[in-house]
Image (spheres, coloured by chain):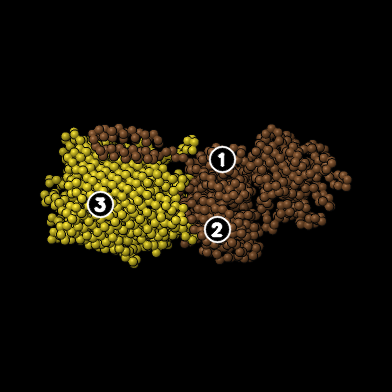
Amino acid sequence: MTKRIFLILIVALCAHSVFADSEAEVDSLYSRFQIEEVEVTARALSKDVIVPQTLKGAELQRLNALSVADALRYFSGVQLKDYGGVGGIKTINVRSMGSQHTAVYYNGVQLGNAQNGQVDLGRFSLDNMEEIQLFNGQKSDIFQSAREFGSAGNVYLTTRKPYFKPDEKVHVRGQMRFGSFALANPNIGVDVKLTDALSLTLDAEYVYSDGKYPFRYRRVLPTGETAYDTIAIRQNGDVNAVRAEVGFHHYYRTTGFWRVHAYNYYSERGVPGAIVNNVWRNGERLWDRNSFVQAQWQDEWFGRWSTRLLAKYANDYTHYKNYDERLLPSNNEYTQQEVYLSLANKVQVFNWWDLSLAYDYQYNTLDRTNLLLNDSKEHFLRHSHWLSAATAFNIKEYLRMQASVLMTAVDRNMPRVTPGVFFSLRPYPAIDLSINAFYKQSYRYPTFNDLYYTDLGNASLRPELARQHSVELAYCVCHKWLTANISASYYYNRVTDKIIAYPKGQQFRWTMLNLGTVKINGVDAKADMSLFLPLRFVLRGRLNYTYQTAIDMTNPNDTYYGHQIPYIPWHSGSVVVELDWQSKRGDHYGLNYSFIYVGERYSQQENIVYNYVQPWYTHDLSLYGEWGIKRWWLKANLEINNLLGQDYEVIQNYPMPKQNVRCTVAVRY
Amino acid sequence: MHSSCKILGINNKDRFAQRVKTGMYYAIHFCLYSLLLTLYSCRGDEVVYPTIGTHVTDEVREGGLYVLCEGNMGSNKARLDYINLHSGEYYSNWYGSQNPRQLKELGDVGNDIQAYGGRLYAVINCSHKVEVMDRKARHIGQVEIPNCRYLAFKGNKMYVSAYVGSVATPELLGSVFEVDTATLEITREVKVGHQPDELCIVDDKLYVVNSGGYITNRHDSTLSVIDLASFTETEKITVGPNPQRVRVDNSGKLWVCTDTSVVILDFIRPGKQIPMRVSNISINGSTAYVIDKEQHKLRAISTIDFMELEQPIDISSYENPYGLLATNDVIYITDAKNYVSSGVLHCYGYDGKEHWRAQTGDIPGHLCRVSGAYDLYPDTTKQDTAKAFSPYISRVYEYLPAMGQFVNVLPKYEEGDDAEAMCRKCEQAIANNAGGMICLGGWGGYVTFGFDHTVENKEGYDLRILGNAFPMSGNEAYGSSEPGIVLVSRDENKNGIPDDTWYELKGSMYDDPTTQHHVSKTYTRASDTIRNAFHSQPYYPQWIEAESITFTGALLAPLTENIGGQNVQRILDFGYVDNKPNTDIEGTSFDLSWAVDADGKSISLPCIDFVRIYTAVDETFPQTGELSTELSGAIDLHIK
């Protein structure tokens, strides 16, 4: 890479608000040998209007986590739904608004699932992930596509970008991971510098696990005597998945770049199902293919006007077949297609005032084929348009502000307008203390399943509305031997017109209705710190704690009126402590301990003893070493998860694995 | 799991303590938060789901009612609740109290519950089993039937409809399984239509509706007729789309509820089709109660002329009317609410007045009234003590009187009653210390009853059996005595039905040379012509379809003598029912040690489950009619 590119980075860093969208590029272009610079950018982030929670680089790789979902457990305000095992579905719910209010972006473009609106984050590997960010509300920079203004919570996944020293042309990375339950997970990556400005990255991964983990059900009588105690092996939880990605990155002039990214994921897995009386295995199988190509082009004119174009085509195929002869036989194929186009512009009117305007268009189709009844092929489609206008300004160092308006039009429904206002106040610029607040409205549109599901659909559904209010107090300490970020936020959210399945008329014919109202009050407290100790020891810590009430306020006549909604714990939190030692040669050795706690909650709407779910908490430990030998770089990592072997369930009747280990060896050239 | 918390606490404390020394104030926060988390709520042992009793009514009725709550698929929350109609106590998760050690509780999605032969049978659909319990819902065994749906019984067989057969077919046909209730083994299987749901038995035919419920836009529309003898499908009758329910009324007509109408099949006369979409149906006497799912109303339809009857119960406030059971005295209707939260069970009188309501589990769908009334004692983990049992008769299994002047009167026969209905009427008269009376008619006529428990043979007398004998004033050796012989039996094959060996309790006349053993007598409907002045109704039991009935047993020599112009009987020493007055405790008590087998050999029974009493004399008088044993109750002397 040329000095010219490096210069861009510096410029980008300085003109943070001007070029902040490529900040991800910036960070990723640093290699891990430039940790200090990364820390600096971390500090800079605290000056954002919206401070994201971030996990990146070495810290991300050293967590006890296999997938993106595992890593997101360490963020505050996040509730993970995990059906267990490598192949089990994992979705997240930010600040109790429901998983469909959280959008997930892969290298800047939203991952869609028009069928059910849920993205299984268990399928995204951490191995090629550079950074994971979670923004409550929306991303800090107004230079974003229109649709990005439309979600209540946003998760940005950024994959590793190539970094080349001047004399380097090729990087090769190989990694092998083994673990409990027959986990085998090889991963290779190749980065090629085609020209000074153009580079190519390839990344491929295979995951296999037989998913046969032991689990235990033990119940006691009120006297303490054992009522029953049984251990069984999870069946039909195997997964076979292949992922392959290729990316081109081209930087030209000092301001422009384009990149193209193609992604393909194929998997076959068993759906292990709920463990209920007399049923210890199920027979459903699931085949998935997710493919997409996305392209991005961005440039800047007159030093003040930036333009970005995004385009994406996605084609997803799902085949679900039930082999369990005892159950409803089913054999369904679903094909989804998505075409997405986005044009975003930003003008810097003055150094302290930005304006942006963006328009997005998306076309979705879903084909459903029931292979048991060959005649029942169904086709659904949807056109969506988003138009956003946003402005950001700052008053010296004291105040940063962002306001946005988004108009959403889905098919022929009445267009809806949602505003968002964000403030960040720094009363004493000398002290890194900020008060951040926002108000935002966002809609969650009904999915194809909500609208058209055979027995369930209701084509006249309105979108679900979330209103968020949030205040945050953040403090940052930056010292020669200590950096620490501490923040606490209070939020009040109200979800109305919540789309819920409701029985109507005939037996077991459900319909979707805009019935629910949920009131959410929560407090997030988080702290992270790095303490630079003598003898090249670094102690890093991360603490998250969330207290929230998410109360059903739908109808005072319901038995569950005023009760906490299902699977939202009152208390949850995590602690991560990492001790890292760097040798004089630059090798690293370290120990990482993490603790995750999810408090008591209820599995159904009524908070009664029959729906009570106990707290769960796991202790995870990992040990790692990283060695540099000439141009080679070697890493070994040993993880022990659920150290004390707690028998727990995140979702009732879906047992989670007890103790399990993973061992990773990686080589890079 | 408590230990793990402690370990965490110590580790963190130690680790943090060092940091505190280095003066890192935020470390204190870490420590405090960690401790807070640790202390706030640790994971404890998972305790079995509790059984919670709630007093819902002061109304006193006989017996109890089981409520099977379905629970949502995958939730494993099928729940069997029970209300003691005598004490008014509603117990949520009653099954849990009786079977706290059942692995993963009752199961996933309850679909049907029925009481038969002193047992309870519950279909747990997604656990692919029929749960077999005793009458207190204690687990006896289970029958594994994939995707089982509904139950019907006849003799010692249970019939279970199932969405899939033991071998899956490409057409996705379902099956009906025949299960031996004694061994709980599947004996036969017959393929029927798509997704068979409810089934019922009339005579030697089984009828099952093929709902086609799996296939939304292509419902099945037939009723399969199965010949029980050959266990083959003999016919498929088209009834209408998506038939889900089939019930038989007291005249043998079938009521089939399809997606569009109620179809009544009468195999003798032309049937009828009522265009009404019905979600549930319950027939009591000559009225069919249905839930009209479009109008959201409870309707009553006469089973005689199919006219809609006035009925005052208003269910318009229900969110989702679901379960329905019409009984002789009251009607029970459940509201399943939104299907994912607790439902409500309502009890109404036929005058439309709501008597009480109780909160149930999720989707209360299936109701089963039983004769046993039980309460739970505070310590739910203790298996029952004798206290929980009733000393009185809990159930009448058979009632077959020989021709007589009180037959069809005590208890009263009404048009449409069958043998089962007559047994229930006998229970109303003599079970649970009700104080009524039933008549066994002439020689040979009998009744078979049992208790809610097994009667033990202990030292001394075991049973008291009450009649209506009274002594002659002034001469205690004579009186109105209409002796009945007592037979007892153990449920040797454990099927809950009195089909086991009978032993006679040897009375004082057993070895008397005038007593004839192994006598038979046949009564025919044709001979039922002579009436006395007081009783003009038919003397032949009207619910019996056979033209003749033959009884076998011992016959005592005539006891009647004319003393002072009055017909009185010589009172026997001991061992006969309705022989000595009820005030004579010893004279109405029986010892199970008296049991003898058919050859007169003494037999030692540790306990018994069934008692049969038959009229032991054959004497008829023009004015006063025949001598016939009357029964007004029985008491297990070991239960206080």
Secondary structure found at label 1: loop
Which label number is shown at residue A436? 3
- Residue A257 image position (x, y, % from top left): 17, 56
Residue shown at 51% from the left, 47% from the top:
B79
Chain holding disc 2: B
Q: Nearer the viewer, residue B528 or B547?
A: B528
- Residue A55 image position (x, y, % from top left): 25, 46
Determine whether, in the image, residue B348 is placed left or right of residue B425. Answer: left
What kind of residue is marked 3? Asn
Chain A's colour?
yellow
Q: Is residue B2 above or below residue B278?
A: above
Which label number is shown at residue B280? 2
Secondary structure found at label 2: strand
Which label number is shown at residue B377? 1
What kind of residue is marked 2? Asn
Q: Specify whether disc 3 shares its chain with disc 2.
A: no
Chain B's colour?
brown
Contact (Cβ within 8 Å) of mark 1 with mark 3 = no
Q: Nearer the viewer, residue B410 or A332?
A: B410
Secondary structure found at label 3: strand
The image quadrant that residue B634 belongs to is top right
- Residue B173 image position (x, y, % from top left): 51, 55
What kind of residue is marked 1? Tyr
- Residue A262 image position (x, y, % from top left): 25, 54
Residue shown at 24% from the left, 50% from the top:
A435
